[in-house]
Image: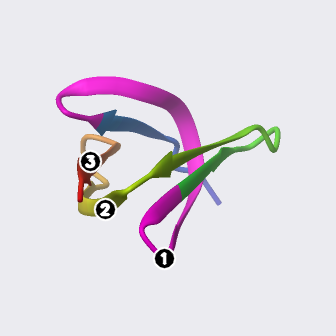
Amino acid sequence: MEMCEFKVFLDENMVFRDAVYAKMESNNVIVRDVLGEFKEFKNCKIIEVDVNSTRLVLSSI
Protein backbone atom coordinates (compact mmCIF):
# COMPACT_ATOMS: atom_id res chain seq x y z
CA MET A 1 0.00 0.00 0.00
CA GLU A 2 1.37 3.37 -1.01
CA MET A 3 1.03 6.21 1.48
CA CYS A 4 -0.30 9.55 0.33
CA GLU A 5 1.35 12.50 2.06
CA PHE A 6 -0.31 15.90 1.72
CA LYS A 7 0.98 19.43 1.64
CA VAL A 8 -1.31 21.58 3.81
CA PHE A 9 -2.18 25.07 2.62
CA LEU A 10 -3.79 27.95 4.51
CA ASP A 11 -4.41 31.27 2.77
CA GLU A 12 -2.38 30.01 -0.23
CA ASN A 13 0.70 29.41 1.95
CA MET A 14 2.08 25.95 2.65
CA VAL A 15 1.88 25.56 6.43
CA PHE A 16 2.60 21.83 6.91
CA ARG A 17 4.27 19.12 4.85
CA ASP A 18 3.83 15.34 4.59
CA ALA A 19 0.49 15.14 6.43
CA VAL A 20 -0.96 11.63 6.58
CA TYR A 21 -3.78 12.44 9.02
CA ALA A 22 -6.23 15.31 9.39
CA LYS A 23 -9.12 15.76 11.81
CA MET A 24 -11.62 18.52 12.49
CA GLU A 25 -12.22 19.14 16.21
CA SER A 26 -14.73 21.87 16.94
CA ASN A 27 -13.38 24.84 14.96
CA ASN A 28 -9.85 23.47 14.75
CA VAL A 29 -7.99 21.20 12.34
CA ILE A 30 -5.24 18.88 13.56
CA VAL A 31 -2.78 17.44 11.04
CA ARG A 32 -0.07 14.87 11.71
CA ASP A 33 2.82 13.41 9.72
CA VAL A 34 4.05 9.81 9.60
CA LEU A 35 6.51 10.50 12.45
CA GLY A 36 3.69 11.70 14.72
CA GLU A 37 4.60 15.37 14.65
CA PHE A 38 1.46 17.45 14.54
CA LYS A 39 0.14 20.97 14.24
CA GLU A 40 -3.21 22.41 15.25
CA PHE A 41 -4.82 25.19 13.23
CA LYS A 42 -7.31 27.12 15.33
CA ASN A 43 -10.50 28.55 13.81
CA CYS A 44 -9.99 26.68 10.53
CA LYS A 45 -11.86 24.16 8.43
CA ILE A 46 -10.93 21.76 5.63
CA ILE A 47 -12.24 23.04 2.30
CA GLU A 48 -10.47 20.79 -0.22
CA VAL A 49 -8.70 17.43 -0.36
CA ASP A 50 -6.98 16.79 -3.69
CA VAL A 51 -5.33 13.37 -3.83
CA ASN A 52 -3.96 13.84 -7.36
CA SER A 53 -1.94 16.91 -6.36
CA THR A 54 -1.54 15.80 -2.69
CA ARG A 55 -3.01 19.07 -1.41
CA LEU A 56 -5.10 19.61 1.71
CA VAL A 57 -6.51 23.13 1.75
CA LEU A 58 -7.69 24.87 4.91
CA SER A 59 -9.64 28.08 5.32
CA SER A 60 -10.04 30.38 8.29
CA ILE A 61 -13.50 30.36 9.83
Residue found at x 47% / y 62%? 28
Q: Which residues are magenta?
A: 10-29
Q: Is residue 17 above or below residue 60?
A: above
Q: Amino acid at mark 3?
A: Val
Residue found at x 19% / y 33%? 11
Q: Give the residue pinned by disc 2.
A: 46
* Side of 38 where 24 appears, left or right: left
Secondary-structure class at tag 3: strand
Give the Cα distance between marks 2 and 3. Answer: 6 Å
Q: Position of residue 45 (x, y in %)?
A: 32, 62
Q: Position of residue 61 (x, y in %)?
A: 23, 59
* Side of 61 where 22 appears, left or right: right
Q: Amino acid at mark 2?
A: Ile
Q: Earlier in the sequence, mark 2 or mark 3?
A: 2
Q: Amino acid at mark 1?
A: Ser
Q: Give the residue pinned by disc 1.
A: 26
The quarter of the image holding the N terminus is: bottom right
Give the Cα distance between marks 3 and 1. Answer: 17 Å
Q: Give the residue pinned by disc 3.
A: 57
10 Å crowding of disc 3: few (<14), some (14-19), many (20+): many
Chief secondary structure of the magenta portion: strand
* Contact between labelled residues 1 and 3, with CB atoms less than 8 Å apart: no
Given residues 23 and 60, the one toward you in this image is 60
Q: Position of residue 50 (x, y in %)?
A: 24, 54
Give the Cα distance between marks 1 and 2. Answer: 12 Å
